[in-house]
Image (cartoon, rainbow, N blue to C red):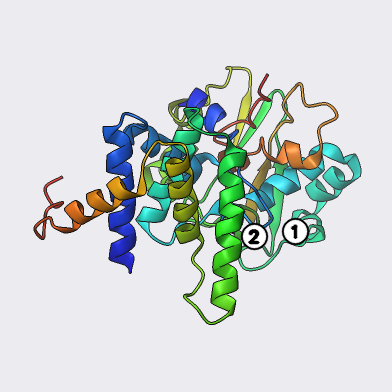
Amino acid sequence: MEHADDLRTEALESLLVEKGLVASEAVDAILRHYEQEVGPLNGARVVARAWSDAAYRRRLLADGTAAIAELGYGGPQGEHIVVVENAPRLHNVVVCTLCSCYPWPVLGLPPAWYKDPAYRSRIVREPRQVLAEMGLALPGDVEIRVWDSSAEIRYLVLPERPAGTEGWSEERLAGLVSRDAMIGVARAAAPRG
Amino acid sequence: MASQGARTAAAPLDLAGPAAPPRRNGELVFEAPWEGRLFGLTLTLHGQGHFEWEEFRERLIRAVARRERAAAAGGAPFRYYEAWRAALEDLLAAKGLCGTAELDTRERQLAARPPGHDHGS
């Protein structure tokens, strides 16, 4: 059965490529986008709520685990989540230097690069350089704080709300919040004009 | 890459409802590589303007409903991306972009390849 599925899909792609309707590289790019850049929804909803509701934001920063549980998320690796908030002059980024601790209930499973020894060691030593390499160039006057997850504590970055999103619904806002923004290696996406 | 991301982020995927793809904590779940390929093909075709998302979505909802009914009645187990493929094939045929007969032919050709054909690529 598996084999028949492979064949049929391969036949479809090869015909569409032959007809010039798609390029395989474009398909690769779309897949990469969905696998690596689209953020987990639970965390995005938490962030969108915090952007929309000042009282919720205060509760979230005071006790991340409890505020996240208000939205129904919790479980293994989420027993003690600390939320760190970005500001115009302050950027937070999360790592687990020892292994790959990660707030599963809000972010799902970590991406491959998060577990990579290079990220785990370098983000502590030269965060500005590593972030720039990952596509986030921060001005020199922005302080970078690196949060190292421990056996008990998991961190979640609360990104800055993008300008031009006044009056947006939480659902719409959540669409701007990528996994990478909640780890701190990207910003929340700007609204499309 | 950033502009690519901004563009593809707008793909009108349902987050809930009968046509929503399987997700685990928001992330798309592909049980096998062909499912991802099929997903990528569909979004690429749409991104290049070959069809309106709603045209695909209507077919997907119908294909999902038909298969869920069949599965509930003791038929083949429901498989989301198999329904997705049927919907895409139907749409491509309706649009005159790719016919079922040529697809069948190509599938037979691929099946007739000698074993180990793809290990060099």
Secondary structure at numbered mark 2: helix
Q: Tell me the quarter of the picture where residue A72 sits.
A: bottom right
Kindly identify which residue carries mark 1: A65
| Figure check: A143 above or below A51 | above
Label 2: how many residues lie within 10 Å, few (<14), some (14-19) or many (20+)? Answer: many
Q: Nearer the viewer, mark 2 or mark 1?
A: 2
- CA gap, disc 2 to disc 1? 10 Å
Q: Which mark is residue A120?
A: none
Q: Which element is circle 1 on? A: helix
Name the kind of residue labelled 2 in the image.
Pro
Q: Residue at x 28, y 46 (%)?
A: B102
**Is B48 in front, or is B10?**
B48
User: Where is residue A49 shown, x and y percent of the image?
Assistant: 80, 44
Query: Does any portion of residue B87 appear in the rendered image?
Result: yes
Question: Percent position (x, y) of residue B29?
Answer: 50, 57
- Tell me the kind of residue under disc 1: Thr
Task: Please indicate whether residue B66 sits to the left or right of residue A158 in the image.
Answer: left
Q: Position of residue A26 (x, y in %)?
A: 38, 32
Give the residue drawn at x 10%, y 60%.
B115
Q: Report the disc number at residue A105.
A: 2
Do dots 2 and 1 share one subunit? yes
- Chain ID at mark 2: A
Observer-nearest of A97 and B47: B47
For image coordinates 32% across by 43% down, the residue present is: A13
Judged from this view, the residue extending furthest toward the bottom is: B74
